[in-house]
Amino acid sequence: MYRKWVGAALLSGLALAVTSGALPAQQRQPSPAQPPALETDPNLDAADQLSPSQIRQPMPAAVAEPTGGGRKRTAPHDTDAIAEPIRSGKASRSGAPREVICSGVFGPDSSHVKLAMAFQTKNVEFTQVDGGSGTKVMASVLFGKDAARRLEVWWSKPASRSDTHLIVINGQSNWSAPGAVRLGLTLPDLERLNGRPFTVAGFDASNVATLSNWNGGELATLPGGCKVGISLRPAQTASASALRALPADRAFPSTDAALRAVNPTVSEILVAY
């Protein structure tokens, strides 16, 4: 299952809600009766070619609106830190800004092989990642041993490791999402990027709030057709009573005084197609 990432209202075209922030498991696609043709490259290490056991990997839950945090990850309705110079095709130095854009190796038709060719085989690993609610899913992880450069790419077709399903930015990653969204941004920061206030679903039992709607702002429609969702965590100084006044079953404008008082910042970013 995916963490709750996208609220109900981010995209009218998406069936899942950001307020729940979940990538519905019912949207999981069954594995094909016959394994799809594998995309291989003679220049890649053997570890980057697909084995029969990997072909049998189950399909991850469908992505809902991106919300992030500790909630089920779902495909974003309207929503995605620092960017790799993908346009030039060159990898930046460790610690330098990197950017996810909705095309090229991060486009909807990408694959593990394309990532390995762009970032070098040694820097891309197909491995288990946190799927939320104690589950694990298989994904391609870029720079898995470097917290600042780490990035997860989930596939719609995990058997062939192809067709981008979800891109996850979390932890200490310095990647930025489309629209210059990055970890650590505050509500005022996000309003400036969006060009207007937006709506947030309140804090759950894990003290994670999620994007509900970009309200038609700049981040609601991004080049390339992807959607960006966020999760937010309150400042460590926020009191339990203040968080209880902002429950997950209610939506709050980003201008809400009580919401601003707990000073939430972006803790996870999900980019979905």
Image (cartoon, rainbow, N blue to C red):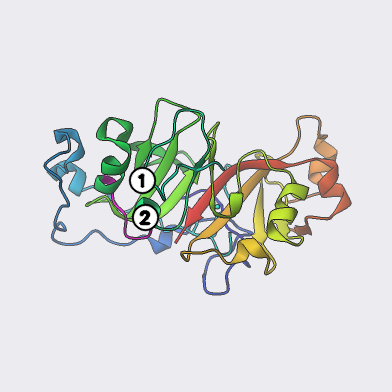
At mark 2, the secondary structure is helix
Instruction: State the image coordinates of residue 204 (x, y, percent, origin top left).
Output: 68, 46
In this view of the protein, which residue sits in the foreground, 158 or 72? Answer: 158
In this picture, residue 39 sits left or right of residue 168? left
In this view of the protein, which residue sits in the foreground, 271 or 72? Answer: 271
- Residue 72 visible in the picture: no
Badge 2 density bin: few <14, some 14–19, many ≥20, Cα 10 Å: some
- For the record, the magenta segment spans 107-112
SS assignment for the magenta stretch, majority: loop
In this view of the protein, which residue sits in the foreground, 113 or 229? Answer: 113
Q: In which quarter of the image is residue 206?
A: top right
Q: Does the magenta run of residues contain 108? A: yes
Farthest residue to the right: give it: 257
Residue 89 numbered mark, or none = 1
Instruction: State the image coordinates of residue 126 (x, y, percent, origin top left).
Output: 29, 38
For the C terminus, the image quarter is bottom left
- Residue 242 visible in the picture: yes
Amino acid bearing label 2: Gly
Residue holding disc 2: 104
- Residue at image location 42% in from the left, 59% down from the top: 62
- Residue at image location 55% in from the left, 63% down from the top: 222
